[in-house]
Image (spheres, grey):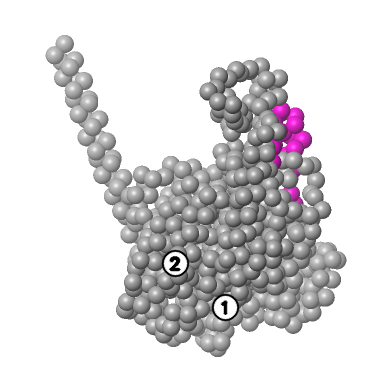
């Protein structure tokens, strides 16, 4: 018996020691990952900056190694955010070691790059060309329409001989779930304000409404028009000719497309690299010096426009607005960040970078309050990214100046309430019944939730709908008044362009919802001007958590999302939307009508 306990004790001790060692090794691995991306790479003379944009682009470069780790291969791949990309391009223009830029759009990611992000990068490249340095573009896998739009900023555009371009225009496809919900016994009960607030249509209709068709047609034509205008100017092809190519979609060889003026050369990659060597006066048998965006941006880490106490705070508000804050979601904690910046005497101006479709109306109002208070003490400039709509516009509207990209999607000023009831599913199909005991007349408001889904066991009654309608209308009136106050408009003037309607940045400028068309760099310059700053330091917020904090705050969720994203590819967004549907969006919501993607 003593031997038995001795072996058991030894086993337990061994197990504990092994786990401690694994724990130490694991954190050693984490530490290695954390420092792996910090090593700078020497930039040699006569170097070409290669921009391939092979990863999805967030507004802000993440310093968290878990965000840069491919859990399938266990390799790190730091993806520069838009802030780093713009900074790198701007710095490269004046860097004597950089000969030019090689825009190498060979990755499928270019097919799904949001338009506003593409345009901000394109505009930065336009500025770069003023340095007199070259930009050449090439693709091995073929240009998407967005990829080609970005590529046309180059001095010359080249393409693999077997990858023709398919110009087709923009289309938006909506999926409707009403018949599916009817079949399984679930009913969507919707309370909304706004003719164009169409987020609820997929659950209540089987086809698009005329109001929704009107707004979608208006903004996709605006987006397409902006793309064609820029392509036409760069390639010296008329907009009518480009539209003719789209209307007469057909298979054309790359050489036929070159005859139309779409390309300057049809080459294989080895020919493209040889061409770059010639431009850099490098012998054909010598190695061309190329540096990636991620490597180049590491050399700029910590470099600011100046040192000193005059700071411009850049606050990133990215993701859906809800009840918790993360790198990809906005929570009430963002209000505390705005308050902290307001109370910092060294911060002379604030740039709020908004990239959000909206979400919780309550959280939006909490953040709005802090933004409004800040405008009374120092300039606040909003820079809108790909989308700043509904709740995203709510948190923006108090700013002194709103800057939007022409292809930003914004507006959607409206509120809706969405509830799902499954009386038929629960009672008729599953055979479950319920009884209630209550203390007051409306204690069973909304019914019960007998399933692990946000589906109640009964529909809302007429009185409950009336109460909720007043709640929604009051929320809408509050939204209108917030915008009216911030934009210097009357309530009725705001209502005229609100009602849930989505606008592009270009359209929003015309109806008074934004002040200036431009990007993040433009917003920073405006902030500096309003604060009277000639020299300043940029400080970014919220301050990112260190890797160990991230490990305990949501590593499992991050790993799961990355693995699913790797497996599902372009279908991951559809999965995510359906997952969100089962977990959220009950109650008062100020959100873009849907997640918008174009094909």
Disc 2 to disc 1, how far (Cα)? 33 Å
Which is more foreground, mark 2 or mark 1? 2
Span of residues in magenta: 173-190
Instruction: Out of 370 and 235, give the one closest to the viewer.
Output: 370
- Which residue sits furthest left? 2
- Tell me where residue 101 sits by quadrant: bottom right
Q: Tell me if I can see residue 366 in this picture.
A: yes
Q: Secondary structure at mark 1?
A: helix
Which numbered tag is attached to residue 374? 2
Residue at (57, 24) in percent of width and height: 450
Residue at (37, 62) in percent of width and height: 340
Quarter holding the N terminus is top left
Instruction: Out of 138 and 516, give the one closest to the viewer.
Output: 516
Residue at (15, 15) in percent of width and height: 3
Left or right of residue 116: residue 80: left
Residue that numbered label 1 is attached to: 125
Q: Say whether disc 2 or disc 1 marks the residue closer to the N-terminus.
A: 1
Q: Residues within 10 Å of mark 2 (few under 14, many from 20)?
A: many
- Tell me where residue 538 sits by quadrant: bottom left
Q: Is residue 129 magenta?
A: no
Instruction: Out of 504 and 269, give the one closest to the viewer.
Output: 504
Left or right of residue 253: residue 56: left
Q: Tell me if I can see residue 296 in this picture.
A: no
Quarter holding the C terminus is bottom right
Task: Tell me residue 27's x, y (percent).
Answer: 29, 47
On screen, residue 457 above or below 301: above
Task: Tell me residue 227's x, y (percent).
Answer: 70, 71
């Amino acid at each position: 018996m003593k031997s038995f306990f001795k072996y058991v004790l030894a086993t337990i001790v061994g197990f504990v020691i092994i786990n401690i060692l694994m724990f130490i090794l694991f954190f050693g691995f984490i530490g290695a990952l954390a420092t792996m991306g910090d090593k700078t790479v020497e930039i040699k003379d006569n170097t070409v900056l290669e921009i391939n944009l092979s990863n999805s682009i967030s507004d802000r470069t993440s310093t968290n190694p878990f965000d840069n780790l491919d859990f399938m291969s266990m390799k790190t791949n730091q993806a520069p955010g838009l802030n780093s990309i713009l900074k790198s391009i701007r710095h490269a223009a004046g860097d004597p070691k950089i000969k030019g830029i090689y825009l190498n759009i060979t990755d499928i990611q270019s097919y799904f790059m949001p338009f506003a992000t593409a345009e901000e990068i394109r505009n930065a490249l336009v500025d770069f060309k003023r340095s007199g340095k070259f930009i050449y573009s090439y693709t091995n896998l073929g240009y998407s329409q967005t990829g080609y739009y970005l590529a046309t900023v180059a001095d010359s555009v080249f393409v693999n001989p077997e990858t023709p371009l398919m110009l087709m225009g923009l289309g938006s496809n909506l999926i409707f779930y009403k018949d599916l919900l009817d079949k399984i016994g679930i009913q969507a009960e919707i309370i909304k304000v706004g003719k164009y607030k169409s987020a609820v249509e997929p659950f209540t209709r089987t086809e698009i409404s005329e109001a929704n068709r009107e707004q979608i047609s208006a903004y996709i034509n605006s987006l397409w028009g902006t793309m064609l205008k820029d392509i036409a100017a760069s390639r010296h092809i008329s907009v009518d000719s480009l539209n003719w190519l789209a209307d007469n979609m057909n298979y054309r060889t790359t050489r036929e497309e070159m005859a139309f003026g779409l390309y300057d050369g049809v080459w294989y990659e080895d020919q493209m690299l040889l061409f770059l060597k010639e431009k850099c006066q490098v012998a054909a048998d010598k190695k061309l010096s190329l540096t990636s965006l991620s490597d180049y941006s590491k050399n700029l880490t910590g470099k600011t426009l100046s040192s000193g106490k005059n700071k411009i705070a850049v606050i990133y508000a990215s993701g859906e607005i809800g009840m918790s804050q993360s790198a990809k979601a906005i929570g009430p904690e963002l209000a505390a960040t705005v308050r902290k910046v307001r109370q910092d005497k060294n911060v002379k101006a604030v740039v709020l970078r908004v990239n959000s479709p909206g979400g919780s109306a309550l959280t939006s109002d909490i953040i709005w309050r802090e933004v409004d208070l800040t405008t009374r003490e120092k300039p606040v400039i909003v820079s809108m990214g790909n989308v700043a709509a509904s709740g995203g516009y709510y948190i923006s509207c108090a700013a002194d100046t709103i800057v939007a990209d022409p292809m930003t999607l914004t507006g959607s000023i409206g509120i809706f309430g969405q509830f799902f009831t499954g009386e038929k599913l629960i009672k008729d199909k599953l055979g479950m019944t319920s009884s209630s005991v209550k203390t007051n007349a409306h204690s069973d408001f909304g019914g019960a939730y007998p399933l692990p889904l946000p589906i109640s066991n009964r529909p809302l009654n007429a009185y409950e709908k009336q109460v909720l309608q007043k709640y929604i209308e009051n929320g809408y009136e509050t939204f209108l008044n917030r915008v009216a106050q911030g934009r210097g408009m009357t309530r009725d003037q705001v209502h005229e362009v609100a009602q849930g309607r989505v606008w592009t940045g270009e359209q929003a400028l015309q109806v008074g919802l934004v002040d200036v068309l431009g990007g993040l760099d433009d917003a920073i310059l405006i902030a500096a001007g309003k604060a009277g700053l000639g020299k300043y330091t940029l400080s970014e917020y919220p301050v990112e958590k260190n890797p160990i904090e991230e490990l305990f705050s949501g590593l499992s969720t991050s790993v799961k999302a990355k693995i699913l994203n790797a497996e599902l590819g372009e279908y991951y967004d559809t999965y995510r939307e359906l997952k969100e549907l089962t977990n959220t969006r009950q109650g008062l919501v100020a959100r873009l009508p849907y997640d918008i993607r174009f094909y």
